[in-house]
Amino acid sequence: MQHADSLIWISGATEGIGLGLSRNVPYAEARVINLSRRTHPAIESVHLDLADPSSWNAVAAHFRETLAGFRGKRAIFVQNAHLKGMTGFAGEVPAADYARDLTANMVAPIRLGEAYLRAVIDSGYTGEAGLVMMSSASARSPYEGQSVYCAGKAALEMWVRVVRRELLQRGRETIWVTAVRPGFVDTGLTRHVAAMADRDYPVASMLRGQIERGEGVMDIDTAARHIWAALPADRSLLLFGDQVQVDRAGSPA
């Protein structure tokens, strides 16, 4: 779309919450772009492999090139993608798998978020610019078998809190950042970890039971509509189906 009023990037828009977000974008005349290893059947796609840093650089260049000269109302990047695969106890899973998990699910999201903010600042874009980093209740709850996932989400939320303060200190009021804990959403990733052996992921049986009962479980479209309705965010953390509250300065309430 050559004259889009909104630019929306969603990483991992081919499945799960990312798919829900892509098909529930509330802005008219929006150019929606999927960042993923897989091509989206309905929207523009740019290759992103969370485990391949060279693809991060290509996405960063895409941010810069797309924002150059953009004069629409808003530009938003939702970092949602997650690499499924490694689940198990530290020191027991193959070292190469553990390292890949660290790269893809801990380093990549922050590198991509920073690249987007850098592109916004360097472009001189003056409209609304937003960054949404998808987090999880795992940021506050230590689940055995998910050491990288829990640590990565906790690090991501702290990164958002610090960056939000930095933007305010520099007087960049048109740029907002937030982390989102979406609650229990029925996605491929949720079902993937629920299917793990209890020995490697002790809460798997609890997840399986919750999915079977439909207890407090949202579908991807409902979750997506809740998230879009909460933007632009005035807090560093948005919670859905979670009890912990965070104030606007980014500190526990």
Image (spheres, grey):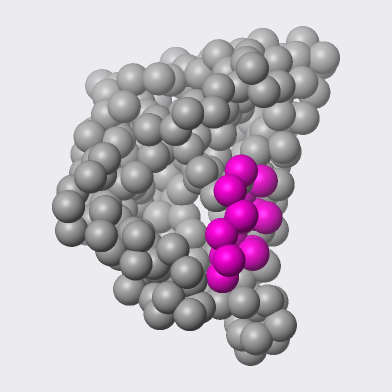
> Nearest the camera: 32 or 93?
93
On the image, the x and y values in percent for residue 156 come to 66, 44
Q: Quadrant of the N terminus?
A: top left
Relative to residue 49, is residue 9 drawn left or right?
left
On the image, the x and y values in percent for residue 219 come to 21, 44
Q: Check if residue 111 falls in the magenta segment.
A: no
Q: Can I make out residue 137 in this image?
A: yes
Task: Please determine whether, in this image, residue 170 is positioned above or below residue 191.
Answer: above
Look at 51% across and 18% down and name the residue there: 233
Q: Quadrant of the C terminus?
A: top right
Look at 55% across and 22% down and name the residue there: 245
User: Residue 3 occupies which quadrant of the picture?
Assistant: top left
Q: Check if residue 144 falls in the magenta segment.
A: yes
On the image, the x and y values in percent for residue 201 come to 48, 71
Relative to residue 113, is residue 243 drawn left or right?
left
On the image, the x and y values in percent for residue 19 come to 28, 49
Q: Can I make out residue 8 in this image?
A: no
Task: Please determine whether, in this image, residue 149 is positioned above or below residue 28.
Answer: below
> Nearest the camera: 138 or 103?
138
User: Residue 20 occupies which quadrant of the picture?
Assistant: top left
Look at 55% across and 14% down and name the residue there: 234
Please give the range of residues in magenta: 140-154
Look at 64% across and 64% down and name the residue there: 148
User: Residue 90 occupies which quadrant of the picture?
Assistant: bottom right
Relative to residue 47, is residue 102 drawn left or right?
right
Task: Please determine whether, in this image, residue 150 is positioned above or below residue 22.
Answer: below
